[in-house]
Amino acid sequence: MLLKDIQKGQSCIVEQIRLPAQMERRLEALGMTKESVISVLNRKGKGIMIIKLRGTRFALGYNMTKNITVREVR
């Protein structure tokens, strides 16, 4: 499942990030690594969303959310 498909209020776990190396390193520096938990706080339009990651809020665009593979928290 892709991050862009997660609904507002749901949480998920990062499985894989498939972005250009520089973007991927930047997200990793911000704390988005494999097995990190993400909560979707708000969604705007197609795949633009505000997420909570390790206590910090981030806004991600569609080009990022469509390239991050996640699984739902059970």
Image (cartoon, rainbow, N blue to C red):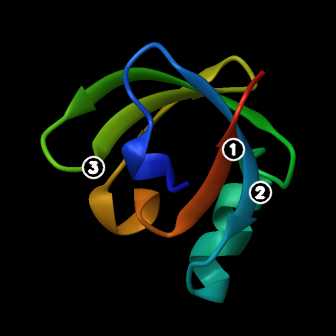
Label pair 2/1, CB-CB below 8 angstroms:
yes
Write the residue at 78% across / 21% down.
Answer: 74
Q: Earlier in the sequence, mark 2 or mark 1?
A: 2
- Identity of the amino acid at label 2? Glu
With respect to residue 55, does 47 lie above or below?
Answer: below
From this viewpoint, which residue is outermost toward the left? 45
Q: Tell us which disc is closer to us: 1 or 3.
A: 1
16 with respect to 61 (left or right) = right
From this viewpoint, which residue is outermost toward the right? 35
Q: Which residue is mark 2?
A: 15
Crowding at dot 1, Cα within 10 Å, few <14 / some 14-19 / many 20+, comes out as some
- Identity of the amino acid at label 3? Gly
Residue 14 is situated, as x and y percent measured from the top left of the image, at 73, 49
Crowding at dot 2, Cα within 10 Å, few <14 / some 14-19 / many 20+, comes out as some
Write the residue at 81% across / 39% down.
Answer: 36
Q: Which quadrant of the view contains residue 29?
A: bottom right
Q: Which residue is mark 3?
A: 47
Residue 53 is situated, as x and y percent measured from the top left of the image, at 66, 29
* Circle 2 SS class: strand
Instruction: Tell me how far mark 2 sits from mark 3, CA to CA.
Output: 18 Å
Q: Which mark is residue 52?
A: none
Instruction: Tell me how far mark 1 sits from mark 3, CA to CA.
Output: 16 Å
Q: Which residue is mark 1?
A: 71
59 with respect to 62 (left or right) = right
